[in-house]
Image (spheres, grey):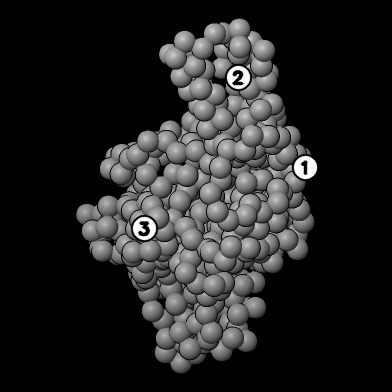
Amino acid sequence: MVGDSVKSFCYTASYRIMAGLRQELGLEPGRHYLPKGHNAARVMSLKLAGINPHYLTSIVGLRDQLTMWAGLDDKSRVRIGWVGTNIILEIPKPTPFWRQVTLDTLERRRMMRRGPVVTLGLGLQDDPKRINFREGAIAHVLISGQTRSGKTNAQKLVGWNIVHNTDPADAQLLIFDVAKRGFKWRDFGHVIHLAHPVITSVEEADQVLAWLSNEIERRAEQRYTTPRIFCLIDELKALTDDSQLAASYLARIASVGGEFGLHLILATQYPQVKLLGGSSELKRNVSTRLCGRVDDAAAAANALGLANSGAEGLQGYGDFLLKDFDGLSRLTVAKIDDHHIEKLPRAEAKYLDLPHHDLANRGPLPAKRGGPDYLQPEEIGPVLFQWGAQPTGINKIQTQAGGVGSKKARRIQRFIIDLIQLAQENGVETIEFNQLGVN
C-alpha cells in the first residue's frame, strides 16, 4: 500500500536523521528538542522544537550528511529552515509519494477568500498560503524559477483568484505576454476583469506601461485608488530586453504604484537584479517573492533577496518558496487547469485609452483634468482636413489630432464617418467636402 510506504519512508528518514544528530552533535530528542513530524504534499517536515539556536550553524553544516542519512538520491537535498527556536528539516519525498494539490483541492477545503486575496497552495502543515493585497506591505510580487517550475501556472492562479474573488468594479487585470504573443494566455482573453486585450507586442506594452505610469499621476491628483489593477507580466526579461522604456516605467510603477492600487505580478526565468533598473529598486519595492527551482545558489539569492534559501534544491513543478513580511516558507502551488479558467465570467473586450506610441516614447503624460472629455474643434479639424477616400487609421488620427488617446481617436473617427454619412443622406454635394480634403 502506498500509504504504508509513505509512513515507512517518513518514519525511517526521521529516525536516521535523529540518530545522525545524536552521533555528530550529541543532540538527544526529548532532552535538547522535541521532534514533531508532518507529512506534507511534497516533503516530510521534521521540526526540532525548542532547540537552542546555537546549534543552527552546526546543523546547516551537516546538510549533505542529512541528505545521505535520509536516504535521498542525488537529485534531492534536505532543506533547513528555522522559525524562532524551531529548526525545520524539510525532507523531499520520492515522487510516487507526492500528493497532488489542485485548485479543486483548495476549493474543496473552502480556502478561498473574498477580495484581493490570492490563495496559492498548501504549506508544510497543509495550511493555506496566501498573498493578501490588502496588507500595506504587499504591493508587488516577483515569481522566479526555471522552465517548467510552474511560474505561469502561479501567475494564472493569481489572475483566477482576482476574477473569482472580486467584482470588476473593484479589480481589473492587464496581461502582458510579449515573448509568446499571448499563446499561453488565450484562455484569459475575454474574462470580465480584463481591462485591455492581452498585450502581445513591445510597442503596445510600452503604451500600456506609459498609461499605467500616467494613471499614478491621475489617481494622485484626483484622489482615488480603485479599481485595483493587477499587471501580470509573463517572461519579464523578454520585455525589458526588447524595450528601452519598460524597465524605467516598471521602476516607476513599482516605486509608488502600490499606494494607488497598481500591482505588478512579474514572472521571469532569470531573476537578474537589473530588471527593474537596479538591485535597490527591486529589493525595496518588490519585497514579496515566489521562487521555484532555480539553477544555483546565486540565482536563488537574486530571486528571493537573501542567501542560503535552498531554492536551488526545490523539486520542480509546483514546489516553491514564498518570501513575504512573515518570513520564508515552503509551499506546493496548486495546479490550475483550463476548465477552471473556462468557468470564469466573460465579457466583450474593453480597451484602455492609450497614448500614441510617440508620446509613450517621451515618458509619462501629464495628468488629465476632471470633467467630460469632449471632442474639440482643434482635434477634429486637422483629421477632417486630411481625410481620404477610406477612413483614416487610429494611429494616424492620434498623431493628426495632437496626440489624443486611442479611445478618443476612435470617437473622432466615428464622428467624421457619421458626419459624412449624414451629409450624403441630406444631399450635400461631395465637392463641398473635397474643399476640406474629404471625398
* Gap between marks 2 and 3 measured at Cα: 39 Å
Q: Earlier in the sequence, mark 2 or mark 1?
A: 1
- Going 50% across and 38% down the picture, which residue do you hit? 351
List x then y, in percent, for residue 201: 61, 31
Q: Nearer the viewer, residue 233 or 429?
A: 429
Q: Amino acid at mark 2?
A: Thr
The image quarter containing residue 404 is top right
For mark 1, what is the residue?
A: 362
Q: Earlier in the sequence, mark 2 or mark 3?
A: 3
List x then y, in percent, for residue 129: 42, 65
Residue 275 can be seen, yes or no = no
Q: How many marks?
A: 3
**10 Å neighbourhood of mark 2: few (<14), some, or many (≥20)?**
some
**10 Å neighbourhood of mark 3: few (<14), some, or many (≥20)?**
some
Q: Amino acid at mark 3?
A: Thr
List x then y, in percent, for residue 197: 48, 36
* Gap between marks 2 and 1 measured at Cα: 24 Å
Up the image or down, 158 lies above or below 65; here it is above
The image quarter containing residue 237 is top right
The image quarter containing residue 166 is bottom left
Q: Nearer the viewer, residue 253 or 62?
A: 253
